[in-house]
Image: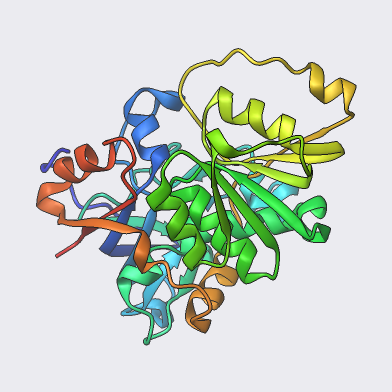
Amino acid sequence: MRSDLPRPEAAAGEARVRMRCAGVCDTDLQLAKGYMGFRGVPGHEVVGEVLESSDPRWRGKRVVCDINAGCGQCTECVDGDSHHCRARSVLGILNRDGAFAEEFVMPERTLVEVPDALADAVAVFAEPLAAALHVLDVEAARHATRVAVVGDGKLGLLIAAALAASGKAVQVVGHHQEKLDLASTFGARGVLEAEFDPTTEPFDAVVEASGSASGLDLALRAVRPRGTVILKTTIAGNAELDLSPVVIHELALVGNRCGSMSRAVALLASGKLDPLPLIAARYPLSRALEAFEHAARRGTLKVLVDGR
């Protein structure tokens, strides 16, 4: 992490935000390995305080932000789909410096105010929770009564918590009994992969959140014929995979990325989902490199970086 970057300047329609708390995501770790060829300041899971903005109503507000900064003019943006704007920048991921810094800038239209009662350590989960809740925007998952989640990492557990909070019967398949026990506190069932038989009772929808070819292979075997597998993870590098089950069983593969920040903040504010058990450690910004190293340890849950 460099410490000599100049203070970011907010353009018209942008806000300059002081980072209060940021989370280390697996995507950040993949970017460090060369994913997407990113160069710059990473960090996109963040809660901050607006220091400067074109609209004075934002100044002093605690906020989270939609990480996708669309151009605001293309067909996708006009239709309310800035997540797929071809000219978009993405906080800490694509053509925009991210939140592992004292300050960062984002368009005001991406900001979502954080309620006073919501602690920073909870609000910082808004971005990954928004992504988790976006699974419910897939019709097959929305209408399914039973959903499996492959992967017991922080994303898989948060997806399981989001689905359980919506009333779904959720089963998490993973490799770590302590994490599967944590899934049970969110209202999901956990099963070790070694004890999981995907042929016994196939699921209407399976969410792949392991980020591995073996996890996707398991998801394809665990879903019923004409069911849907939802892909949630991004990884650096290529993977070999037998896709013949997709053809034989007429499966649907659906990519699924970012979701509604407002919906995530509302769920966190409701108290129906408490993400605090997912926190493994917290570091000050001055020790951000240590935070990354800790987050990269196999099996680590959420590591947070505090702005002060």
- In the picture, measured across the screen, residue 207 lies left or right of residue 214, that is right
Tell me what residue is drawn at x 70 percent, y 43 percent.
206
Q: Quadrant of residue 169?
A: bottom right
Counting labels gives 0
Colour pattern of the rendering: rainbow
Q: In which image quadrant can residue 289 be found?
A: top left
Left or right: 214, with 24 as reference point: right
Relative to 98, residue 298 above or below: above
Between 84 and 158, the one nearer to me in the picture = 158
Q: Position of residue 303 (x, y in %)?
A: 28, 52
Q: Quadrant of residue 193?
A: top right
The vertical placement of 272 against 174, above or below, is below
Work out whether residue 53 can be spotted: no
| Residue beneath the point at 62% across and 60% down | 133
Q: Residue 86: x and y, percent? A: 63, 37
Residue in the foreground of this view, choosing between 78 and 113: 113
